[in-house]
Image (tube, rainbow, N blue to C red):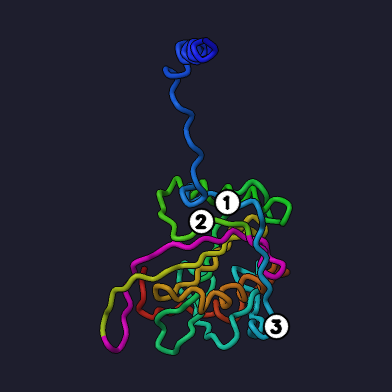
């Protein structure tokens, strides 16, 4: 008799909607999170003096100063770039392209206090562009430079003495904002080689700082040049 009462009670619960209610959706595992989702914690990267080469004259019309990675070569200015650094004399990859444009971020500078807001801003922009990412946008402080980091792929053409070749590279991209200008430090390597060369990209980011305006943009921006490569 007691079992019968329990059975009637359970049946009444099901009849009240338990079996007819849609099951609650299961939470996504971390691996299924959107590629632009940022983690809560900020990643901090240390850069030693040995990683950084000699400081260059002010760049981007005297707005910023930065330095190449130790042992890398700076190329003359090419339209669309602040400066370009190459690891090899053959001017292929790995290489680092630094670009600048007016920033759409609400704040004139990226700081540790607004870094997570900037990461969200970058992630939303990339999502709007439909850009597939190899690694998601994360908040990072490189040396003392707060920035957003992510990794994507790019198909490029390279022209050398051996002729023209097309290959896919991975790009570790670091973005920050200084004086309402968005600076992008784009390390491009052969597939799977970012861990080997990422410290070079970090060295450039750690050296990036605002500079006193001057009439001479200096050094690597003095002349225009072309090494025959294109994205």
Q: Nearer the viewer, residue 99 or 222?
A: 99
Q: Quadrant of the C terminus?
A: bottom left
Mark 2–mark 1 CB contact (< 8 Å): yes
Q: Position of residue 36 (x, y in %)?
A: 50, 50
**First in sequence: mark 2 vs mark 3:** 3
Q: Is residue 213 visible?
A: no
Q: Is residue 116 magenta?
A: no
Helix, strand or loop under label 2 = strand
Residue range corresponding to the magenta coloring = 140-162
Main SS class of the magenta portion in the image: strand
Is residue 171 left or right of 44 when viewed as pictured? left
Give residue 41's position: percent from left, percent from top: 66, 55
Q: Residue at x 35, y 78 (%)?
A: 228
Q: Position of residue 110 (x, y in %)?
A: 67, 56
User: Which residue lies under the disc numbered 1?
Assistant: 38
Select label 2 or label 3 by which is in front: 2
Residue named by callout 3 = 49
CA neighbours of label 1 inside 10 A, class few (<14), some (14 to 19), many (20+): some
Q: Which residue is mark 2?
A: 136
């Amino acid at each position: 008799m007691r079992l019968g009462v329990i059975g009637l009670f359970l049946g009444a619960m099901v009849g009240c909607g338990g079996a007819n209610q849609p099951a609650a959706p299961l939470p996504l595992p971390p691996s299924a999170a959107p590629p632009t989702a940022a983690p809560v914690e900020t990643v901090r990267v240390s850069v030693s003096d040995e990683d950084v080469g000699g400081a260059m004259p002010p760049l981007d019309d005297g707005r910023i100063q930065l330095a190449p990675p130790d042992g890398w070569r700076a190329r003359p200015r090419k339209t669309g770039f602040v400066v370009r650094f190459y690891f090899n004399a053959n001017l292929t990859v790995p290489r680092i392209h630094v670009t600048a444009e007016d920033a759409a971020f609400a704040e004139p500078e990226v700081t540790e206090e607004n870094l997570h807001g900037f990461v969200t801003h970058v992630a939303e922009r990339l999502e709007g562009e439909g850009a597939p990412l190899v690694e998601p946008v994360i908040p990072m402080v490189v040396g003392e430079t707060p920035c957003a980091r992510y990794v994507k792929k790019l198909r490029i053409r390279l022209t050398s003495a051996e002729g023209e070749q097309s290959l896919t590279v991975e790009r570790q991209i670091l973005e920050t904002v200084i004086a309402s200008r968005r600076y992008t430090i784009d390390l491009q390597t052969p597939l799977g080689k970012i861990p080997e060369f990422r410290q070079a990209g970090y060295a450039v980011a750690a050296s990036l700082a605002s500079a006193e305006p001057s009439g001479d943009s200096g050094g690597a921006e003095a002349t225009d040049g072309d090494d025959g490569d294109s994205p």
